[in-house]
Amino acid sequence: MCRFLRLDFSRVGGLLPLSLDTREVGRVTIVRCHGRIVAGTESESLRAHVTWLLRDRRSIVLHLGEVGFIDSSGLGTMVRVLASTRQAHGDLKLCNVPDFVRKVLEMSRLTSVFDSHESEEKAVAAFYRPEARAETPLPAGRSVLCLDSNADVLAYLRELLRRAGYDVQSSSRVSDALLLMRVAHFDLLLAGPGMTASPASPPAFQAACAKLPVIELGSEFSTSHAGEAGAGLLETIQARLKA
């Protein structure tokens, strides 16, 4: 009796279709690429995704650590994405570049075209250097880091504080907030309920929090009257920074 085994090559090794996982780390947007970057749907999706990000973001990192294969068209897409980002007065960097991708860049003589870094932290840090391209002129106001798991709350806080003259950066993850604390200076940490006191918070994050003023949002902030909650928060921030 013969038995046949059917293999689904679309899900084997480097032949995984491209998926993109995006998150914001302060002023930087990290796009984690998983699968292959090749001609067709994959290249088109990467180009369309970066174009969508460029509506309001200018500092982009492509994390390539989980890319299994890249063809000539895919490499061309990366070049076009880099050009589009710089035409929008931004910049794009690579991180966690696999050895085979690095060799492709070397063979194609493109290593000098892309700014590559060995980790996300180093790529993000590169955007915070004084000589780095900035997506917008840096505000002269005090710098506030907002940390909350609620993306809607973060969007509100960014808009509220920027209109009040603060330099605002945000993160929804403790690990990313810690990364930002390592590469940039902040005058104040504004944290969602339980974010700083969580037993799961790493000691390094707790130590960093001990070095700057911290304001914790109450659990009722997200459901309070937006105008009243915002006005009260601005008063609290101003008083804390003066103190």
Image (cartoon, grey):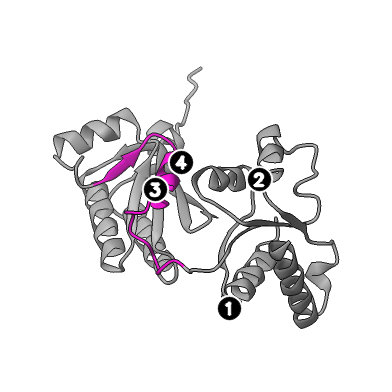
Disc 4 residue crowd, few under 14, some 14–19, many 20+, Cα 10 Å: many
What residue is disc 3 on? Answer: 62
Write the start and end of the magenta stretch as one range.
Answer: 114-138
What secondary structure is marked by label 3?
strand
x, y (%) of residue 94?
A: 35, 44
Assess whether residue 230 is covered by the magenta stretch. Answer: no
Residue 13 figure quarter:
top left
What residue is disc 1 on? Answer: 163
Q: Amino acid at mark 1?
A: Arg
Front-most of residues 75 and 237: 237
**Nearer the viewer's eye, disc 4 or disc 1?**
1
What secondary structure is marked by label 4?
helix
Disc 3 residue crowd, few under 14, some 14–19, many 20+, Cα 10 Å: many
Residues at discs 3 and 1 in contact (Cβ within 8 Å)? no
Left or right side of 194 for 126: left
Assess whether residue 122 is covered by the magenta stretch. Answer: yes
**Nearer the viewer's eye, disc 3 or disc 2?**
2
Residues at discs 3 and 4 in contact (Cβ within 8 Å)? no
x, y (%) of residue 14?
A: 38, 34
**Nearer the viewer's eye, disc 2 or disc 1?**
1
Q: Amino acid at mark 3?
A: Leu
Residue 175 figure quarter:
top right
Q: Amino acid at mark 2?
A: Val
